[in-house]
Image (tube, rainbow, N blue to C red):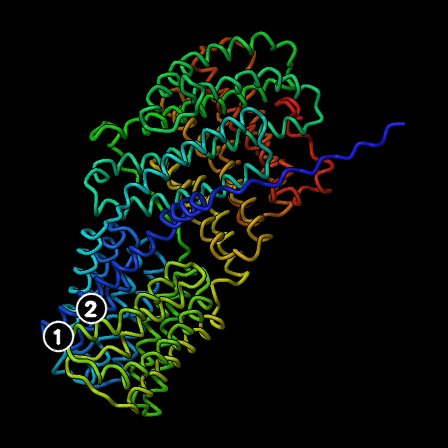
Amino acid sequence: MSSPSVPAPAPAAVRPPFGQQLREAAADWWQTEFPNWIYVFKMVFAGLLALGIGYGLDLESPRSGLITVFIVMQPQSGMILAKSFYRVIGTLVGSVAIFVFVGLFAQTPELFLLATALWIGLCTLGSAHNRNFRSYGFVLSGYTVALIGLPAALNPALTFDSVMTRVTEITVGIVCAGVVSALVFPQASAPGLVRIIRGRFTAFVDLIGATLGGTADRKALEATNARFVGDIIGLEALRSSAIFEDPEIRLRSGRLTRMNSEFMALSTRVHALHQLMNRLHDSNNPSAQLVINAITPYYSEVQPLLTRSGGEPVMTASDAADAALKLEAYKQELPRRVRTTRAMHAEAFGDDAILDFDTASELLYRVIDELHAYTLTYASLVQRRHEREQWEHAYAPKTSLAIASIAGARAAITLIGLSAFWIFSGWPSGDVAALNAAAFCAITSAAPDPAKATRTVTMGVALAVVLGYFYTFHIVPQLDGFWMLAAALTPVLMLAVLLTTRPSLAGYGLGICIFFPFVAVPDNLAHFNAAGYLNECIALMVSLIVTTVSFMLLLPPTTNWTVRHLEKQLRKQVVQACFGKLAHLALQFESGTRDLMHQITMVTGSRPALRKNAFGWMFSTLEIGHAVIELRTELHGIRSGNPELLPDSAYTALNRLRETLPALFEQPTPATLAAVLGANNNAIAEVQRAIGPHYRERSERHRLQRTLSYLHFIRTALLDPQSPLQPMHQDGGANTPPATHSGANHAA
């Protein structure tokens, strides 16, 4: 009897040589950490340069230039230039407001503080209502009045000198930040923009392959679309800053905006096609499988059009030129081939499935058409000048005026409260508390969670106060000259800037960056007053604590009410789709819907259930709203070219549908949903009667069939079992006809 074999021990994992590990670690550090350290050295150098110039020009408060550098600091040069531009504009507007307020209310401090509070409230409203660095311009115009206006109101004769000094100090900081960022190891925005464009195109090619190939499930598709929402907003923000630094980007700015617009339309169309096919797969109607078998072969033909000769996916703009040629040829042949397929299967389909096939084929053609346009624009980026640059339809963000007004009111109420306490208590440092609270209400109002952002900054300020006391009374008096001061400040400033490169610690770093120079860096005429120092530091802490409390109590942006309000605004985009002017309506609808969804995403980071529900409404809004816009465009063409193509009863039915849809999305209830479904069924029946069995010109029949396809798609979207409208169906949808019924059954 043979003895059982003993398994050989598994070979030990072979470790790479120490030298190789060291090289890999160094390469990883070079790619991830080295850029951060370059950024730290650049910003500290720019800040100290501004401080030195301030001392050299004998400015009253050279530290203002240092603080300005840290306020405008950004990784890319274009972002610094954009932020600096709006900082200058905001400071100049605020300076004009100071002259007006001091001239009117210098003798009545109560009225001056009230006017200042109202001004800051209006500027905070403008900041919350705008996007990118335009928002920062509103912030600056608001708290410039607080930072300069309050001291100027106490000494009206010095108003002009105070304003001019402040503008000079800010300008020194802006110039130093811009020059150092552009000349010392410059990090341009353009390469990041190229990476985003290329990565998004590649990701979308993969998405189309998975979607049309049938390998993408609903969750994966929704996750990808959620990522695309952030990409759309991010690309627009990066483009708007990159045009400040790179003439090549300025020459292509119109095409980049056009790509964003085409990408939004294309992603909506792909999602709609995928959802329609999902509904066909889930249908219990036997004819649905016939439609799937007839249309699916076309889907498998799309992926090869987006691959290079070697089988790799299209990535660069040069590769996209060949893909555009293939897409154009495919687009030209597709209608003829689809007509042939429809004729071959017409008898097998019957009335029950022909409408599904027409809707799916129309969506497929739209996908190919918009994919071709998107690819053409991408391919045109290799040329400095191109006809596709002519694009005037800018990205149109959508902000709730109610939420922006709440942010403005919060800032005004906070300033009025602290100002009243200052006046009635006679607190010597009450002006410091009031102006800093106003500034931080304005600065943090755009944050997803302002209360949390202010709390982290407050902790950073507390550390800055402790370090500032040690520096002010134990180190600075021992120093002799600027160079020793710069050497003493460098370690703390480097630590603070380094913290800002870590997302979880950025608030602490920002608090140190701004307030450590404020308390520790001496003016040209230095004062060492311990009681005054403690009074100002207490005022700083009180202002931040009051700001945090105001964000927690005065309708904070993270409440469920805010999310529900934004979700309602998102649904109301369907009202715009139904009644907005058709010129540029599709882009305004697409960008506004995604912008609202981006805002919801920002305030629901810790509440995935709310975010998931909002995404459901976004997809329903995009699907139905886009179909309504297409339907209105088609009807506009019919009315303009051949109004007799549809009878008056059809126009009446279509108008009825357009009237009932907004009511459903404003107030989703079983009654409003039933009204929309009834109006939609009636419109489908009227258009089917207009098509009729009699002969029509091919162009006329196709126009009516497209109209019918849009109506049918709206109905399938309303009946989607995954839609947030599903609970509105009577009896949970048990008695609702399947989404793939024919037009004849619709009319029954």
The amino acid sitting under disc 2 is: Gly
Quadrant of the rendered image containing residue 7? top right
Left or right: 460 as drawn, with respect to 687 = left
Q: Position of residue 237 (x, y in %)?
A: 33, 48
Label 1 CA crowd tier, 10 Å (few <14, some 14–19, many 20+): many
Q: For the point 44% across and 73% down, which residue is it?
A: 548
Report which residue position mark 1 lands on.
59
CB atoms of marks 1 and 2 within 8 Å: yes
Pointer 1 or 2: first along the chain: 1
In this rendering, does residue 707 appear at all? Answer: yes
Quadrant of the rendered image containing residue 444? bottom left
Camera-nearest residue between 738 and 379:
379
3D distance between C-alphas at marks 1 and 2: 10 Å
Camera-nearest residue between 44 and 269:
44
Q: Secondary structure at mark 1?
A: loop
In this rendering, does residue 660 appear at all? Answer: no
Q: Position of residue 443 (x, y in %)?
A: 34, 66
Judged from this view, the residue extending furthest toward the left is 57
Q: For the point 67% across and 26% down, which residue is it?
A: 748
